[in-house]
Image (cartoon, coloured by chain):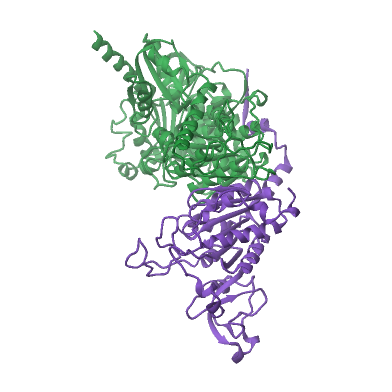
């Protein structure tokens, strides 16, 4: 996605290409340390002042056989001097540690991309293992690219001739060679990584020495070898002042829930069963007992949500984290939380489905499941974070709604933003919205299902409160008293009350954000984790003169009040989703507006340019029709 | 309301009790309402959590905090409550279908963790609420609506299952043994850890008389072995006793072998003995009632609390600023 390339003679006499943004992918075996390499490269880019976004892409298998396509692990970063909204459509630079890594990523590269291959790994057997009939580096397969052949393993071993490490251990350092080389290519300082090596391997001086030597060898190789005609210069971005850190979506989610509990003045309980890609939230929250967080790794998904409901009944900020298959298992219990009107947040980190589907890949196909996937009429609010950093704010919002309205709330994230990372401006804790919860203690006039006239919330009573002993459960409640009731009229009234309670939340949430003009030819509507790609595509479309705007939804139930009127001000309305059109179904049913579909269900995020192309095609088709 | 002034009446609710007339559940309810005021626990600190089934209607009839949840999940829900609110006395009321069929997983894991819950399992060896299908404790060959030619599957012995799941307290009693039932509930209440009490309960509609050999005056002496810690395993008015030949239990005449030869019950004995005891059944053996196993080990909820307090002692528990700044940060501008 380079928009400005200019070549200058650099200090070294080589060409320096100035880029506004550039995408780099590191790829190797899952044991090659590609995630670590990517993390280091990312932190250094942030320290240099670039804006950036990253995406790891790892195999579902923990250790697939070495050298196979199934075992390829990748890490992509896009960084630049502009506002970076996605990890990039197509890498400009690929580092391929073996033939499998090359084969798996070749189709994604931009024409003319730079490819750094570890020639030591390209023997005949390794090439044939992944279906190359000849060495692709030599047979013209890579003619469209700028290929740099570097003997990573040989040079790494040579740099470590005096090291006491075994050959096997030495070879494991070669990712630092790749990193050092990339630092040279992009003119980056090595300081951060050098310090990090010192700290990380403090217990083993030989490993510190080896990794340090190899990192420097990579840098020096770039500097002294004639092979590389070009280096890149990527200027710092204009970034809002503040203290920054890196955060993945799942990490921000965990931080958000801890903060939310503090803002609510209650303690956080997590009931969870490990599941990809949600487990990192469990891991992160388990580390923070000092904040009163109690994590409970339950025996299954159902126990996890049931325990959370029990914690909510006890007065806690209750959370359960899972992915689509887990949501399916939790459905009955979520219905219980609807019926008993207890605050609960169910975090669904979506992945490819149906069934086990694509556990490590992203998708947005759980929207209708979380909206409707329960027996009976069981409405509840849905909040969908838009970026890794937004997971923090969305988690707080989910807890705010759950406690204020006494209702279960879905937090609908996805694998893409859960694992994706971005620099995050750490918020000032004192500026966060406070919403201290209160528990009923007043005995006089207490009725378990008496409602707050504004929010329709019922009182939250903690067991242990004298004089308020009462019974709740999954059977239909009599309005007010909460006693078991089979009365037909009462049932219908309660169904309406529960719906009305959720509907009224529309008065308490902000309008959906609109980028671009508030009227025009085409409105692109998205929700959740596709924010970056849709926003970037809309920027390009507008730059090309199209009257296109982007409306992004964080609240999916109820919908913000400006959604319908905004839709009516555009010639075409297009819902872009990583599913078969689930939001589209809702919008059409609700508003009787002919919303068009722009879908992708490949387990992959949208690419910016595919969105641009498809929207332009839709604009052209419409024009033809009206002409 | 202070605990000392409580009476049976304080635990009764205004709800009509809707079990079938003659159901064994009435007798169990009566004993709960007798025992709870005696425990020295303020009424507001009781929470009764149930699943689904006839027995699970129980919370509606006890004037405490109560939660009638969903089928099989009561131990899981109660676990979350207990972890957050360790000061509460949390009771789980369940049945043989609820605890052993749909909820089997939650039961064994609660026991394994030694969550401080009192689980009272009403075992009537039948599905009552769904009108009479066989349950996981029904005997092989049972003819019910869903097994007109006789059931085919082997039943569980609930206490044996619990012992296999590392239970720290298992006991058995029966609805019609009122005094014994009350004593057993007391023992469960006093135990720190998961206490599983199996109550043989008569379903007079779908499985009438399933336990009459244990509970009826004319028959129970020869079939009921009431165990007590430190006392020999004798029954039938002290005329018969249990001895072990290796791992195999044997019924002997006390007069023949002498009382000293009879095996002495120990609640803290190796679990293999407790398993053998739990699995004694007619016709060749009596059925054991009483506290079969009682050992002390740390409870999950107390361990969680200790970890939280240990972490909080190290640093400021309200410092969100520090949380958000963990790891690498950098300044811009």
Instruction: List x then y, in percent, for residue B99.
Output: 50, 57
Which of the 4 image quarters holds residue A458? top right
Q: Name the residue nearer the viewer: A294 or A585.
A: A585
Q: Name the residue nearer the viewer: A248 or A573.
A: A573
Q: Residue at x 66, y 73 (%)?
A: B229
- Relative to A580, say whether B270 is above or below: below
- Relative to A617, say whether A306 is above or below: below
Instruction: List x then y, in percent, for residue A405.
Output: 56, 31
Instruction: List x then y, in percent, for residue A228.
Output: 43, 25
Residue farthest to the bottom?
A: B256
Where is the C terminus of chain B found, in terms of image quarters? top right
Q: Residue at x 57, y 51 (%)?
A: B59
The answer to whether residue A112 is seen in the rendering is no
Which of the 4 image quarters holds residue A470? top right
- Relative to A191, say whether A97 is above or below: below
Which of the 4 image quarters holds residue B116? bottom right
Q: Chain A in the picture: what colour?
A: green
Q: Chain B in the picture: what colour?
A: purple
Instruction: List x then y, in percent, for residue A368.
Output: 39, 33
């Amino acid at each position: 996605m380079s928009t400005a390339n200019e070549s200058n003679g650099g200090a070294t006499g080589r060409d320096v290409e100035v880029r506004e943004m550039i995408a780099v992918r590191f790829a190797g075996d899952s044991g090659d340390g590609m995630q670590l390499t990517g993390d280091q490269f990312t932190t250094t880019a942030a320290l240099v002042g670039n804006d950036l976004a990253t995406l790891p892409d790892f195999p579902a298998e923990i250790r697939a056989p070495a050298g196979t396509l199934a075992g390829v692990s990748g890490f992509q970063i896009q960084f630049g001097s502009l506002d970076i909204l996605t990890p990039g459509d197509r890498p400009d630079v690929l580092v391929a540690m073996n033939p499998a890594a090359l084969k798996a990523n070749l189709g994604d590269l931009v024409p003319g991309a730079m490819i750094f291959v570890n020639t030591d790994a390209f023997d005949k057997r390794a090439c044939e293992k992944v279906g190359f009939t000849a060495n692709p580096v030599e047979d013209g397969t890579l003619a469209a690219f700028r290929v740099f052949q570097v003997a990573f393993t040989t040079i790494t071993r040579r740099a470590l001739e005096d090291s006491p490490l075994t050959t096997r251990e030495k070879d494991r350092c070669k990712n630092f060679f790749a990193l050092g080389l990339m630092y040279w290519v992009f003119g980056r300082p090595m300081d951060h990584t050098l310090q990090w090596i010192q700290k990380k391997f403090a217990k083993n001086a030989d490993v510190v020495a080896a990794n340090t030597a190899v990192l420097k060898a990579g840098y020096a190789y770039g500097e002294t070898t004639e092979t590389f005609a070009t280096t890149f210069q990527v200027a710092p971005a204009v970034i809002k002042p503040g203290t920054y850190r890196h955060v993945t979506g799942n990490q921000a989610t965990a931080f958000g829930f801890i903060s939310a509990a503090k803002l609510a003045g209650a303690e956080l309980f997590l009931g969870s069963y490990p599941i990809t890609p949600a487990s990192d939230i469990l891991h992160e929250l388990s580390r923070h007992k000092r904040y009163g967080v109690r994590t409970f790794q339950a025996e299954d998904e159902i126990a996890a949500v049931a325990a959370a409901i029990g914690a909510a009944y006890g007065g806690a900020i209750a959370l359960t984290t899972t992915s689509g298959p887990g949501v399916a298992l939790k459905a009955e219990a979520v219905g219980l939380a609807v019926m008993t009107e207890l605050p609960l947040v169910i975090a669904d980190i979506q992945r490819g489905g149906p069934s086990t589907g694509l556990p490590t890949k992203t998708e947005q196909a759980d929207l209708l499941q979380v909206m409707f996937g329960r027996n009976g009429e069981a409405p509840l609010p849905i909040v969908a974070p838009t970026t890794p950093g937004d997971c923090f704010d969305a988690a707080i919002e989910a807890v705010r709604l759950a406690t204020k309205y006494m209702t279960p709330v879905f937090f609908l994230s996805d694998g893409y933003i859960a694992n994706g990372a971005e620099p995050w401006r750490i918020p000032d804790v004192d500026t966060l919205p406070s919403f201290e919860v209160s528990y009923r203690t007043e005995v006089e006039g207490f009725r378990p299902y008496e409602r707050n006239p504004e929010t329709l919330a019922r009182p939250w009573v903690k067991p242990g409160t004298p004089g308020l002993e009462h019974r709740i459960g999954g059977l239909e409640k009599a309005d007010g008293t909460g006693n078991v009731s089979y009365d037909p009229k009462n049932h219908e009234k309660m169904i309406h009350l529960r719906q009305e309670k959720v509907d009224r939340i529309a008065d308490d949430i902000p309008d959906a954000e609109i980028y671009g003009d508030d009227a025009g030819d085409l409105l692109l509507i998205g929700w959740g984790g596709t924010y970056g790609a849709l926003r970037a595509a809309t920027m390009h479309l507008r730059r090309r003169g199209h009257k296109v705007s982007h409306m992004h939804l964080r609240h999916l139930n109820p919908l913000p009040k400006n959604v319908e009127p905004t839709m009516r001000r555009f010639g075409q309305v297009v819902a872009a989703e990583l599913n078969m059109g689930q939001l589209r179904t809702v919008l059409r049913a609700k508003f009787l507006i002919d919303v068009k579909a722009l879908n992708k269900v490949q387990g992959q995020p949208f690419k910016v340019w595919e969105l641009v192309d498809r929207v332009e095609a839709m604009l052209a088709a419409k024009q033809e029709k009206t002409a | 309301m202070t605990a000392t002034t409580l009476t049976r009446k304080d635990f009764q609710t205004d709800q009509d009790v809707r079990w079938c007339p003659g159901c064994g559940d009435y007798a169990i309810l009566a004993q709960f309402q007798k025992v709870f005021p005696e425990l020295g626990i303020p009424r507001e600190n009781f929470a009764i959590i149930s699943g689904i089934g006839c027995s699970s209607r129980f919370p509606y009839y006890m004037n405490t905090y109560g939660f009638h949840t969903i089928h099989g999940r009561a131990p899981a829900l109660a676990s979350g409550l207990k972890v957050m609110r360790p000061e509460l006395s949390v009771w789980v009321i369940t049945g043989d279908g609820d605890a052993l069929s749909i909820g089997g997983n939650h039961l064994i894991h609660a026991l394994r963790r030694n969550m401080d819950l009192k689980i009272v399992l009403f075992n009537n060896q039948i599905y009552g609420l769904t009108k009479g299908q066989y349950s996981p404790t029904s005997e092989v060959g049972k003819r019910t609506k869903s097994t007109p030619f006789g059931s085919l599957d082997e039943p569980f012995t609930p206490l044996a299952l619990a012992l296999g799941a590392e239970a720290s307290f298992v006991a058995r009693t029966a609805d019609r043994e009122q005094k014994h039932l009350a004593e057993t509930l007391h023992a469960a209440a006093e135990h720190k850890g998961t206490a599983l009490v199996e109550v043989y309960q008569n379903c007079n509609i779908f499985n009438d008389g399933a336990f009459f050999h244990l509970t009826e005056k004319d028959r129970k002496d020869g079939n009921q072995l009431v165990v007590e810690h430190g006392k020999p395993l004798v029954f039938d008015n002290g005329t018969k006793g249990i001895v072990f030949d290796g791992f195999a239990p044997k019924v002997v005449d006390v007069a023949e072998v002498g009382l000293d030869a009879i095996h002495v019950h120990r609640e803290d004995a190796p679990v293999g003995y407790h398993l053998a005891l739990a699995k004694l059944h007619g016709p060749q053996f009596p059925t054991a009632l009483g506290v079969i196993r009682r050992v002390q080990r740390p409870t999950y909820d107390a361990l969680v609390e200790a970890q939280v307090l240990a972490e909080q002692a190290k640093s400021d528990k309200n410092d969100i600023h520090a949380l958000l700044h963990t790891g690498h940060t950098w300044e811009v501008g």
